[in-house]
Amino acid sequence: MLEVRDLYVGYYKDLNILQGISLTAQARKITTVLGANGVGKSTLLKAIYGFLRPNKGEILLEGENIIGTPTHELINQGVSYIPQQPGIFRWMSVEENLIMGAWTFRQDKARIKRKLEENYERFPLLRERRKSLAGELSGGMQRMVEVGRTLMTDPKIILVDEPTAGLAKLLAEEIYQMLADLRDKDGMTIILVDQAIRQALKIADYVYVLELGRNKFEGPVEEFTDLKKALWV
């Protein structure tokens, strides 16, 4: 579905945070990227989504190199991104936040209505709170709004950056279950960047571990049951 080949990326041309990273995300699977803070996990997602232009390497979506593709075109090609920091519009209602996710087809009222209804069927709590201000919701429900807004564009692949940062354990478990359901029930492809190793491994299909901007380990999640010490679990 998506392949990263020998990627070098940095915030300055002569200083690469990622140094030769390679990764493959299979369709309808959760590919989890683990590692300590500062190893380049978020930088990887930003490069895939076009926020950072690599200094070297390739990023292939279904075989086509997408480096240099504007973000709005990536959305139309089925790529979406959920950043670590909450990105909801706190002073707007839940439904208004969801509609903001439809800006690339904002003139198609019928499609917007259909996608809203799909979100409400998937997340009944959002239907109940659709008129509430998003800023008044719990942290877990705010994340639900963000996921719902992302799904308005019918993504094929979702890039998710530390989705439970700052959330209580119970709310975090709900978010991980939500991601697992998107894979299992909706057939989504997910690249999950995380520091919450135990929880991320519970829903992962394939795992990469980064260290100092390079690949350290990779393999099916089953191979990581004996690597707990190496993963700081």
Image: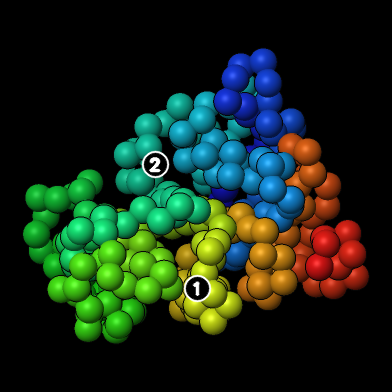
- Which residue is pictured at 59% across the width and 65% down the height? 29
Q: Secondary structure at mark 1?
A: helix
Image position, residue 125 (x, y; %): 30, 82
Q: Residue tagged by mark 2?
A: 74
Dot 2 amino acid type: Leu
Residue 218 has which mark?
A: none
User: Marks 1 and 2, how far apart in space?
Assistant: 25 Å
Amino acid tagged 1:
Ile
Question: Where, by quadrant of the figure, is residue 86 drawn?
Answer: bottom left
Question: How is the structure coloured here?
Answer: rainbow
In the picture of the structure, the residue carrying the numbered disc 1 is: 175
Q: Is residue 196 left or right of residue 184?
A: right
Q: Are marks 1 and 2 in contact (CB under 8 Å)?
A: no
Q: Earlier in the sequence, mark 1 or mark 2?
A: 2
Q: Residue 205 in the image: x percent, y percent?
A: 68, 68
Res. 51 in view: yes
The structure residue drawn at horizontal position 52% and vertical position 26%, both measured from the top left corner, is 53
